[in-house]
Image (cartoon, rainbow, N blue to C red):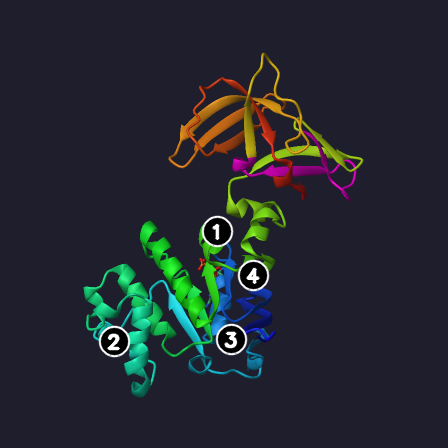
Amino acid sequence: MTDTPRLALTNISKSFGGQKVVDDVSLDIMPGQVTCLLGPSGCGKSTTLRITAGVEMQDSGSIHLDGNLICDTKHHVPPENRSIGLMFQDFALFPHLSVAANVGFGIPKSEAHKRVPELLAKVGMQRHIDRFPHELSGGEQQRVALARALAPRPRVMLMDEPFSGLDDRLRDEIRDETLDVLKAEGTAVLLVTHEPTEAMRMADEIALMRKGRIVQRGAPYNIYNSPIDLEAAKFFSDINIISGEVQGALTRTAFGEFLAPGVENGQVVDICIRPHHLKIDFDRHGRGPNPTPSDGTAARGIVKRARYVGSQSIVEFKMDSDGSILTAHIPSVFLPKPDTPLWLMIRRDRCFVFPRN
Ligand SMILES: Nc1ncnc2c1ncn2[C@@H]1O[C@H](COP(=O)(O)OP(=O)(O)OP(=O)(O)O)[C@@H](O)[C@H]1O
């Protein structure tokens, strides 16, 4: 096991028409590791991928593969010599070539007779070896595209929203299968997506990108549970915000006091909580449950609306304290009538406290 990253991007920047679309991006990916570049449309994900592939030139910064320089502002190994495989949404197989010929396209014939059936077996497509692309479903074409991309044993696989053309159920299946195959081959993967669930499902590491910059990197668990700011928190789910002013490093709210260390007196902070981390309790003649260290003080709200959406119930409350609206997601059928008073508690270990800008 070596410590040298399979792929290392160092301080990559790129502008178009005077506007920086990739801004000082650094990343490293180990063999067999999947890193997802996750961010909203237009944040520079695809440009980063194209620079890595070698089809776009960066203005500054360098790229190394297994410790060897493949590109800086002076050197430029052409895309076909980078040992990098590509998979995009519009992965177009060659329509006039059979499945076998598509997969064997980029490798010597002497190797193809062994490698092609081996790869098709890996992606579960060996029985379709003599078919043509138009005789395959979207999912089957995707599997062949994966086998084709893996045929030359690329050291790195770049994937740009590769599953977005597939319907939901098929997408989950192909995603998992693709991941298994890539892991078994030990390929380092850089995958671009704007879908948090896809990133959470695929990634060993997520690099959250915004306006050309990587604003946070970490394992999915860490990114989800310790977002760097409100925007990062919002990217993964709806968020409830409880605001308060800091006095003596404490913020007083209807849910009790929250620590805000290092925040100046008078500064407003947003205490953020995901809807499934709200707890609900019943009204006991105008009183709620007793405070606990883990859930803090309960605050009363009046049900505005409750809907059941299959996997959970979504209940909206108007809070007595300030009239704000909070939303709770309950993983069961829970449909209280509008105007029912109920008490809400927030899991304090699941709160994020951010000073407002
Ligand atoms: N060749 C180009 N010339 C000029 N502007 C470009 C070029 N390529 C990309 N851009 C601009 O750079 C910005 C980043 O584009 P990019 O495709 O990298 O974003 P993205 O995060 O991948 O978005 P999406 O998810 O929508 O594909 C966009 O504003 C885009 O319009």
Q: Nearer the viewer, mark 2 or mark 1?
A: 2
Residue corresponding to mark 3:
57
Q: CA distance from mark 3 to mark 2?
A: 34 Å
**Mark in the foreground, 3 or 2:** 2
- x, y percent for residue 282: 54, 20
Which amino acid is tagged 3? Met
**Residue that label 1 marks:** 196
On whether ligand 1 comes within 8 Å of the CB at mark 3, the answer is: no
Q: Residue furthest bottom?
A: 110
Residue 167 visible in the displayed image: no
Q: CA distance from mark 2 to mark 1?
A: 35 Å
Amino acid at the residue labelled 2: Ala
| Distance of label 4 from label 3 (alpha carbons) | 15 Å
Above or below for 68 versus 202? below
Label 1 or label 3, whichever comes before in sequence order: 3
- Queried whether the magenta region covers residue 233, the answer comes back as no
Q: Residue at x 19, y 73 (%)?
A: 130
Residue at image coords 46%, 63%: 191
The mark nearer the N terminus, 4 or 3, is 3
**What amino acid does circle 4 point to?**
Gly
Viewer-nearest of labels 2 and 4?
Answer: 2
Q: Is residue 119 left or right of residue 224?
A: left
Picture coordinates of residue 109 (x, y %)?
Answer: 29, 86
Residue at disc 2, secondary structure: helix
Which image quarter holds the N terminus? bottom right
Question: In the rendered structure, which segment of residues is drawn in magenta?
Answer: 256-277
How many residues crowd mark 3 within 10 Å: few (<14), some (14–19), many (20+)? some
Q: Which quadrant of the structure image shows residue 91?
A: bottom left
First in residue order: circle 3 vs circle 2 = 3
Q: Is 276 in the magenta?
A: yes
In the rendered image, is residue 109 in sight? yes
- Residue at the spot x=26%, y=73% of the render? 94
